[in-house]
Image (tube, rainbow, N blue to C red):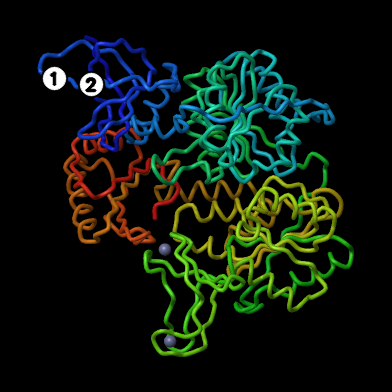
Amino acid sequence: MNYYRLAVNTPFNNSLLSYCSEEEFEIGDIVKVPLGRRTELGLVIETLEKEDNIEYKSIIEKVPGSLKSEEYFIQLIKLIAQYYYYPMGRLYFESLPKLLKRPRGEFEPIIGQSQKKIEPNQLQTDIINSIQTEMLQNPTPQFLIHGVTGSGKTLIYTELMGNVLQTGKSVLFLLPEINLTPQFIDDLSQQISGKIITYNSSLNDSQKFHVWNKVHDLDEPMVIIGVRSSVFLPIKNLGLIIVDEEHDHSFKQEDRCPYHARDVAFFKAKLSKCPVVLGSATPSVESYYRFTTQLPHHYFRLDKRANLKPMPSILLVDKKIEGAETIVSTPSIKLLEKAHKDKRQSIIYINRLGYAQFLTCQKCGHRFDCPNCSMSLRVFKKKNILRCSCCNFEKRKPDQCPECQNLKLEPIGLGTERILETLNKSHPDLKVVRFDREELKSFEDIKATLKDFADSKIDVLVGTQMITKGHNFEKVDNVIILGIDNQLNFPDFRSGERVFQQVLQVAGRSGRFENEGFVVVETMNTENEIFDYIKNYKVDEFYKFEIDLRRATHFPPFYSLVMISLSAAKLDKVMQESHNVVRELQLYNKGVCEIYGPKPAIVEKRVNKFTWNIILRASDRNSLRIVLDNWYKNNKIQSGISLKIDVDPLSIN
Ligand SMILES: [Zn+2]
Ligand SMILES: [Zn+2]
């Protein structure tokens, strides 16, 4: 008889269980096992000696034709599961593509053909050389390239990739989903000679299965370009990981295991003995602080655009003077008109979909809320509906207040649709088009709109975050930023950082090629110091200000945070259990951590489940982990309550 430790696909804290079998298995095999009354999948991670007082259940069978994992990959999953307090078995099976008996089709990589159109300039060459030299001396160095939009970070990446491919190793290039545009892949494939595989949410199960197998058994080096989840691809012979836009919040998974792909990349690189290069125009405060203070020789700056065009001028418009009800201010309108006259283009950015944030009765103040969530329903005028941005609940837009039968219902707040409508009314000669996921459903739609914009058939694009990434707009002179105050006033320790990042990211779209660019930020808070840093491109001053603030208020990178969330359908159950958790934590704590809460999440009810949060904070990460380890091993959360432990949360709401 043989005995094995398996990582079983279960939500229990301890997913590592022992089984036996007459048959012999190898580490990395996927098998079926009995678990309670069900059959579950398990991963063989260790062979064991028989112990007397254990009753072993038998492994049912090996899953035929399934994927096989190498030990280093199992090791990665184990480390990540430990770091994030997540069941290892569950994490492993979530990181796999769906196991298919008969995957359809094949998956062929794109063949990159280097045209060598662009040669790196002196600064880029210096950075490439520094990184290469360091890579020869140290197997796992980490670098941060902090360069403004258009400064040519991508060219540095492609040069590094080319060199790594030549040594016979592969490259993993991580970027936010939104950046993985067809244009980006086209551009990249003209800068690299070699095979390229892309991995994103548009792949079907068969394609994902093929990619997984392909990178596992690579017989020649490749570049794998992918979004967050591709950090779990078991790439053979990995020689470099690049994380572009490392500050981007889409690298953090919010549901299931709340991992950050950048941080997983560090673990992966250590195990694969390869370097990591981070890049961003607006690095996270944590990365900036870490590299400038601890790794200054691995921190590179590109403050100028590669084509030497000046950075756009950033102007603030005081909404207090313009009036809060003004949708687009007079100075912004003037810029739109001027651009139109000069046959140039403009972009309006607002990170809000639809027509308005909510609908309210003018007489009694009734608000239309989601029945499943503690959220107001957003107004979508063209579709004539109200919709919840949390659970997608929809209903027809009412004509009448259900409380007082008043017919005057007022939409409050802005969205792309409302800006479009306002401009269409005031400026019928301007061709204005929306650029958001409500209007553009597919890659094809996006391509078509971008083509119309490039062909000057559109004067103004009104878009959400989608508009900020991965596009080279040649004729855009102006970028107008609306609704940034929502972000600024959001009660979170990262609000300032997010405003700084959003404004500079969008601003980077203007004046890149010909005319001087202008960026208008409309705000009620012109006196906020953040805008002074932004407007004058005082980048280091901004980071210093933010770092001092974090130090003084006990936030990362000076303090570590963990957020424990409990959710269930019954509010009283959640409240009671949250209080229990705090009491249990205090038993282990002995004054090491600050423990806050329990308190309701900022959106307390989501899809009919209530969530309460508890925050742990400590200056010493290890002591915090000891408290949490002890609690985690012994916790007895009632069944029916789901537990989420968010290590290094991006937000504590
Ligand atoms: Zn009313
Ligand atoms: Zn809802």
As helix, strand or loop, the secondary structure at mark 1 comes to loop
Residue at the spot x=61%, y=40% of the render? 245
Residue placed most toward the observer, 130 or 113? 113
Task: Give above or below for 596 relative to 621.
Answer: below
Q: Name the quarter showing ligand 2.
A: bottom left
- Asked if residue 144 lies left or right of residue 578, the reply is right
CB-based contact (under 8 Å), mark 1 and mark 2 = yes
Residue placed most toward the observer, 335 or 21? 21
Q: Quadrant of residue 424?
A: bottom right
Residue at the spot x=51%, y=31% of the render? 231
As helix, strand or loop, the secondary structure at mark 2 comes to strand
> Which numbered circle lies on residue 54?
1
- Asked if residue 543 lies left or right of residue 569, the reply is right
- Asked if residue 407 lies left or right of residue 620, the reply is right
Task: Give above or below for 265 relative to 309.
Answer: above
Residue topped by disc 2: 18
10 Å neighbourhood of mark 1: few (<14), some, or many (≥20)?
few
Three-letter code, disc 2 = Ser
